[in-house]
Image (cartoon, grey):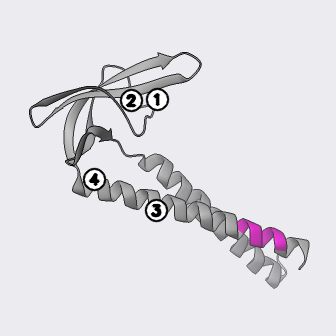
Amino acid sequence: MSSKKKQNTLLILFGSIVLLVGLFATGMDIYQMSNYERVESTLVVKQKYRKGYTAYASYEYNGVEYEDKGLSYYNAFFMKDGKKFTVLINPGKPEKPCTTSFALNMLAVILGGASIYGVIVKARNESRGLMQ
């Protein structure tokens, strides 16, 4: 196998894995959004020594107050300390709030798809003699 073919195969393999991970994570977020309950909460951001920032949510669910519960995902650009936002609550585990990470999921889907597409276009152009 030539080095170009080996490179193309590795890039397609990498792109496929990234694409599948992005699609799986997006599917999980869609599942959570459709099956979990939405609850208004307040964000609390705390800095931990040598670990950076950690986000916590405080909310009420079914009459019970939950304080400083760790989030499954935190976006420092959009989620600011003291800001109100919606968390997703699994009725079976209301003490574990969830948030979605569609931006990261879509980035994985786009990068994976783009790497596969790039290899295919490059190979097609090479076979037509358009690239040297």
**Is the residue marked by circle 2 packed among few (<14), some (14-19), or many (20+) residues within 10 Å?**
some
The residue that disc 2 covers is: 79
Q: Which residue is drawn at 80% across and 84% down?
A: 128
Do tag 4 and tag 1 residues touch (Cβ < 8 Å)?
no
Q: Which of 106 and 27 is in front in this view?
A: 27
Residue 13: where, in percent of width, then height? 68, 69
The residue that disc 4 covers is: 33
Q: Which disc is residue 127 wearing?
A: none
Q: Which of 130 and 26 is in front in this view?
A: 26
Q: Is residue 104 shown to the viewer in this render?
A: yes
The residue that disc 1 covers is: 76
Marks 4 and 1, how far apart in space?
21 Å
> Label 2 amino acid?
Met
Magenta part of the protein: which range? 6-11
Residue 11 lies in quadrant: bottom right
Residue 114 lies in quadrant: bottom right
- Asked which secondary structure carries label 4, the reply is helix
Which mark is first along the chain, 4 or 3?
Answer: 3
> Label 3 amino acid?
Phe
**Is the residue marked by circle 1 packed among few (<14), some (14-19), or many (20+) residues within 10 Å?**
few
Q: Which residue is drawn at 46% across and 29% down?
A: 76
Image vertical order of residue 80 relative to residue 118, above or below: above
Residue 60: where, in percent of width, then height? 16, 31
Residue 20: where, in percent of width, then height? 54, 65
Looking at the image, is mark 1 or mark 3 nearer the viewer?
Answer: 3
> Label 4 amino acid?
Met
> Label 1 amino acid?
Ala
| Side of 72 where 123 appears, left or right | right
The residue that disc 3 covers is: 24
Is 108 covered by the magenta stretch? Answer: no
Marks 4 and 2, how far apart in space?
18 Å
Residue 6: where, in percent of width, then height? 83, 72
